[in-house]
Image: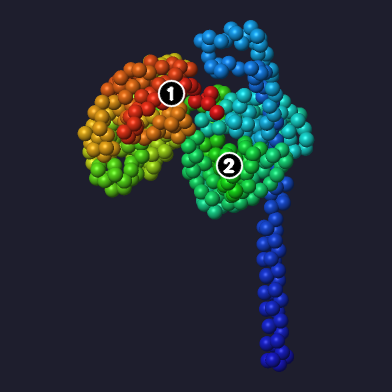
């Protein structure tokens, strides 16, 4: 074989090898592009949920011009001529999604999917339908655990680790949007740690995988086929913006619901607020990390451990607090009775305090309105402080009497009623508020279901703000 022939022969061999490798690569790429095998594997673990709830409404055609008042002088007149309004029952049907947690029939979904439902039906992919009972719900995380009695073992999901997710990771959503069962959408993780103002434990994953009404309660999978989130919320009118609860939080909640029917969270008994640039500068802090203690609940765990107003909480058991909302989520992840260490900054110096967590007061059976932080006060959602000369100067407040609102929790009674940061509370239910002690006593005197009447100073105006004290779970 001549040298030219050898060169031609080896060139042909190398070309064939290169073409074969390229063909193999293209085949693998094409296989990766199709999610069909993954969808076939995961779909049997996803269920559709149909609910029925009953509401009552009157059919009265005539109403008093004075509205619905117990002391209406024309009430008897209207009853005499038009009679009492008969109550009619209306059935409302709802749709949602869920997924199989265990092969013996435990189902995970959102609390808002089954809330107030009188009948719950779970439909499997093969069309089998089962009546479901609610094992437990947790409105604060918007999760619920259901149970059905299947004829055979069911295909349960596998859980992933949501803490390891990175922005840009591929995800897959399967659910029941608009009643279109087992709809599949794909996208990426768009952001982590989103707070939507729905509560103290907001920690949502944001995704551009299409999520619509009916997807609620369904699973968000990674491309390994593991559940990494529970699809929970959307922004009205938003496209490519959906939110899911991270599965690591879900596992803890569901485990407690399965074992005890309720969720118990740790509590340290502090009111905290963000460390603003102005606060960081005034306290000579290097950055805006941590949670500023605005108040300490008397007799609570933090009070017993020596936490003081003005402390900056930087760490809980080594978990750094980069932003204030992280503190309640980290504390709530520990069980009551857990002994933890708080690292705080006080007067520019670090201190480590030993603290034993207690149960969140709103869940304590013996909780009453005499508690330092009762249910009404918790749901009110206000952080206030006395008006010091420094506060007067910074907020341009003329009054020396009263308390000033320094922060308002989102989705709280106070927020919904229209109270604002910087408002000075002068009276509560006609009782003058001169300091924090007056404020605490006034709040403590209001029972669930009664009305608040706040007199506040807002700029140069004095206004009344009225609303009803109600349990957080009773609010829509």
What percent of the width, then of the height, locates residue 469? Answer: 46, 21
Q: Earlier in the sequence, mark 1 or mark 2?
A: 2
Return the x and y of residue 94 as percentages of the image width and height: 68, 31
Mark 1: few, some, or many residues within 10 Å (few <14, many ≥20)? Answer: some
Please, is residue 330 above or below residue 226 in the view?
above
Q: Which residue is mark 2?
A: 236
Mark 1 sits on what residue? 466
Position above or below: 314 against 368: below
Q: Label 2, secondary structure: give it.
A: loop
Snapshot quadrant of residue 301: top left
**Quadrant the N terminus occupies:** bottom right
The answer to whether residue 301 of the structure is visible from this angle is no
Q: Residue furthest right?
A: 127
Residue 476, image x, y percentages: 55, 28
Quadrant of residue 147 within the rendered picture: top right
Quick check: marks 1 and 2 in contact, CB under 8 Å?
Answer: no
Question: Is residue 110 left or right of 152 when viewed as pictured?
Answer: left
Question: Is residue 281 depicted above or below 32 in this figure?
Answer: above
Q: Position of residue 335 (x, y in %)?
A: 45, 28
Question: Is the residue 233 above or below the residue 262 in the image?
Answer: below
In front of the other: label 1 or label 2? 1
């Amino acid at each position: 074989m001549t040298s030219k022939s050898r060169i031609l022969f080896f060139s042909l061999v190398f070309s064939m090898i290169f073409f074969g490798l390229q063909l193999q690569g293209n085949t693998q790429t094409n296989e990766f592009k199709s999610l069909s095998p993954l969808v076939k594997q995961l779909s049997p673990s996803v269920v559709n949920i149909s609910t029925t709830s009953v509401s009552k409404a009157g059919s009265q055609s005539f109403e008093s011009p004075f509205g619905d008042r117990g002391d209406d002088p024309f009430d008897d007149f209207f009853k005499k001529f038009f009679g009492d309004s008969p109550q009619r029952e209306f059935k409302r049907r709802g749709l949602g999604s869920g997924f199989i947690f265990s092969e013996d029939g435990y189902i995970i979904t959102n609390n808002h999917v089954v809330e107030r439902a009188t009948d719950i039906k779970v439909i499997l992919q093969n069309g089998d339908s089962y009546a479901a009972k609610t094992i437990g719900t947790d409105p604060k995380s918007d999760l619920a655990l259901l149970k059905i009695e299947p004829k055979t073992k069911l295909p349960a999901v596998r859980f992933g680790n949501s803490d390891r997710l990175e922005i840009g990771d591929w995800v897959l959503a399967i659910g029941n949007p608009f009643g279109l069962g087992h709809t599949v959408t794909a996208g990426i993780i768009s952001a982590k740690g989103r707070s939507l103002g729905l509560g103290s434990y907001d920690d949502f994953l944001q995704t551009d995988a299409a999520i619509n009404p009916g997807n609620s309660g369904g699973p968000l999978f990674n491309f390994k086929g593991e559940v990494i989130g529970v699809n929970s919320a959307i922004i009205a009118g938003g496209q490519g913006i959906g939110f899911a609860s991270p599965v690591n939080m879900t596992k803890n909640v569901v485990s407690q619901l399965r074992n005890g029917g309720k969720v118990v969270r740790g509590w340290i008994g502090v009111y905290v607020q963000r460390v603003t640039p102005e606060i960081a500068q005034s306290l000579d802090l290097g950055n805006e990390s941590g949670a500023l203690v605005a108040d300490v609940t008397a007799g609570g765990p933090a009070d017993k451990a020596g936490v003081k107003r003005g402390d900056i909480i930087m760490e809980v058991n080594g978990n750094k607090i980069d932003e204030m909302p992280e503190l309640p989520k980290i504390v709530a992840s520990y069980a009551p009775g857990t002994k933890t260490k708080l690292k705080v900054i006080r007067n520019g110096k670090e201190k480590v305090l030993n603290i034993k967590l207690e149960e969140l007061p709103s869940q304590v059976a013996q909780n009453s309105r005499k508690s330092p932080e009762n249910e009404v006060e918790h749901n009110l959602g206000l952080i206030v402080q006395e008006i010091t000369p420094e506060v007067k100067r910074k907020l341009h407040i003329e009054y020396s009497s009263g308390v000033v609102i320094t922060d308002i929790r989102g989705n709280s009674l106070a927020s919904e009623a229209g109270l604002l940061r910087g408002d000075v509370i002068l009276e509560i239910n006609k009782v003058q508020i001169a300091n924090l002690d007056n404020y605490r006593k006034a709040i403590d005197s209001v029972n669930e279901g009664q009305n608040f009447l706040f007199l506040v100073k807002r700029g140069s105006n004095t206004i009344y703000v009225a609303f009803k004290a109600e349990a957080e779970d009773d609010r829509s």
